[in-house]
Image (spheres, rainbow, N blue to C red):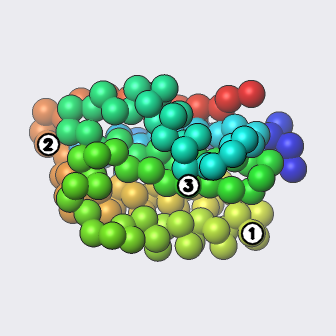
Amino acid sequence: MTQKEFVAKLDQPRIVAAISAAEGRTSGEIRVHIQPKSGGDIRKVAERTFERLGMTKTALRNGVLLFIACEEQKFTILGDQGIDEKVPAGFWDDIAAKLTIRFQNGEFTDGIVEAIAGAGEHLATYFPRAADDVDELANEINIEP
């Protein structure tokens, strides 16, 4: 499936709303990035994208990136340093397992929305939203040609 076809199947307003809702429970910042291919080690490419999107600049270093290489049907979930220092190993495994099943069934929007909600729920435990919390990163989907 091409990136254009993948993106056309997404309910982008629903995904952006899911990000806003999840961030309403946590000080964590969640971004979704879509590109055609990873062009190599998906984790390394996602780490570079994480940096490029300014996600390491959050006050608590608690950004989360859902990086999707849609033409390869691959994804990875990255948490910033502040998250990695606090959460147990395998923190993202259940979200990744559910997202894999959703993607295999062609349920892309549902899978992404569910992953975002799960990330928000998990992060709320370690990074509850403060009364003076500021939305530090844009909530829109980042789509790279």
Point 77% across, 53% down: residue: 72
- Disc 3 or 1, which lies upstream in sequence? 3
Residue type, numbered disc 2: Ala
**What mark, if any, has residue 104 been given in the picture?**
1
Tag 3, which secondary structure? Answer: strand
- C-alpha separation, residue under disc 3 versus residue under disc 1: 15 Å
- Give the residue at x 80% y 48%: 71
Crowdedness near tag 2: few (<14), some (14–19) or many (≥20) residues, C-alpha within 10 Å: few
Instruction: Tell me if 38 is positioned left or right of 122 in this view.
Output: right
Secondary element at tag 2 = loop
Work out how far the residue at label 2 is from the one at label 1, CA to CA, in angstroms.
37 Å
Q: Position of residue 79 (x, y in %)?
A: 38, 50
If you read the primary sequence from the N terminus, does the residue marked by circle 2 or circle 3 appear first? 3
Residue 3, image x, y percentages: 80, 40
Q: Position of residue 61 (x, y in %)?
A: 26, 39
Q: Kindly identify the amino acid type of the residue bearing the numbered disc 1.
A: Gln
Q: Amino acid at mark 3?
A: Thr
10 Å crowding of disc 1: few (<14), some (14-19), many (20+): few
Q: In the rendered picture of this protein, how many numbered marks are placed on residues? A: 3
Q: Position of residue 75 (x, y in %)?
A: 62, 54
- The label shown at residue 130 is 2
* Residue identifier under label 3: 76
